[in-house]
Amino acid sequence: MDLVAKRSINCEQGAVRAVRYNVDGSYCLSCGSDKKIKLWNPRTGLLLKTYGGHADEVMDAAGSCESSYIVSASLDKSVIYWDVSTGLPVRRLRGHAGGVTCIRFNEESSIAVSGSKDNTVACWDIRTRKLDAVQTMREAKDCITALVVSEHKIISSSLDGSIRQYDIRAGELVCDTIGVPITYLVQTRDGQCLLAACSDGTIRLIDNDSGELLAVYKGHRVDDYTIECGIIAADTKIISGSAEGAAIVWDLLEGKEVRRLRIGSEVVHSLAPHPTGSDILFARKRHLEVWGKPEEDEEEVIE
């Protein structure tokens, strides 16, 4: 885990709420408390575009499978579908009764899935002009905090302490209750396990099929923040932000801490591993930090 700090970008958009790579990792998005989304080249630190149209803080964003569209989620209760090149909103989707906390595309980027403080998950057909959600899941008892969307499944985590898996093809719902508020959720690349960051300062590895608890990871500070986690190094390592301005890396199988990255003095709350490479984006206060293996940068410069 030889990761070094490569670049620090002052996003100049108030507090950065989330950082996300696009589908191939060539660009990244920062979501700001200034109600805007910014598109960056993470290798050079160049600002490519700013998207403004929300009336409140932007909490999450996702790029489409061909990188020509973005969806964003905001506390203004709306989802906006953007044209990447023009920077203009194509469609504004309103239907949530509370702030929208998380957003994902399905694999073909034909459906956007959003989770909200109104305890619902909504599916939007963004290729048609239909402005109402095509499906709304109302089973959660508290705020939806994260979404994992695959070909035929929508998996949501909630502050009610449960992970709900909606099988779209079979029309089935499986609910696994952890019993502690879940603040973030990701899936391993092989789709076998889920990683749930919980408000009690524990990250739990859960078997996707059985719901069995496989491992726990501790040592990061959560305080009262929503701290994101991720899976890196071909599903062999777990990484999480921490309230003391660090990122902690654990061995997935052994559960032992293997590295502690000192990112800065502020809370490191959002992170995004590169889809194919070893780089990782971190958000702390106003900054987007790029970490990775030092030799990768040299190869890109030579190209």
Image: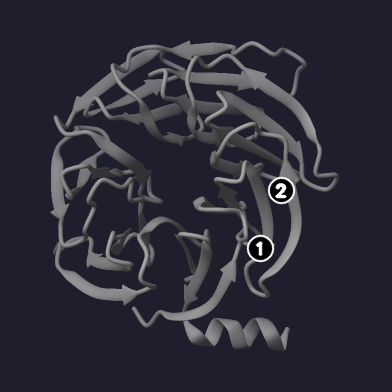
Residue 27 placement, left or right of 208: right
Which residue has dot 1 on it?
A: 26
Q: Position of residue 213 (x, y in %)?
A: 14, 41
- Return the residue nearer the eye: 89 or 188: 89
In the picture, residue 249 is in which quadrant?
bottom left
Residue assigned mark 2: 67
Residue 275 versus residue 152: which sits nearer the camera?
Answer: 275
- Marks 2 and 1 sit apart, C-alpha to C-alpha, by 10 Å
Q: Quadrant of the N terminus?
A: bottom left
Q: Sequence order check: which comes first, mark 2 or mark 1?
A: 1
Name the amino acid, label 2.
Answer: Ser
Query: Which quarter shows the C terminus?
Result: bottom right
What's under tag 1, amino acid-wise?
Answer: Ser
Give the residue at x 14% y 51%. Answer: 215
Q: Secondary structure at mark 2?
A: loop
Residue 184 on image: x %, y %: 34, 42
Q: Is residue 41 above or below residue 83?
A: below
Residue at point 16% right, 62% down? 219
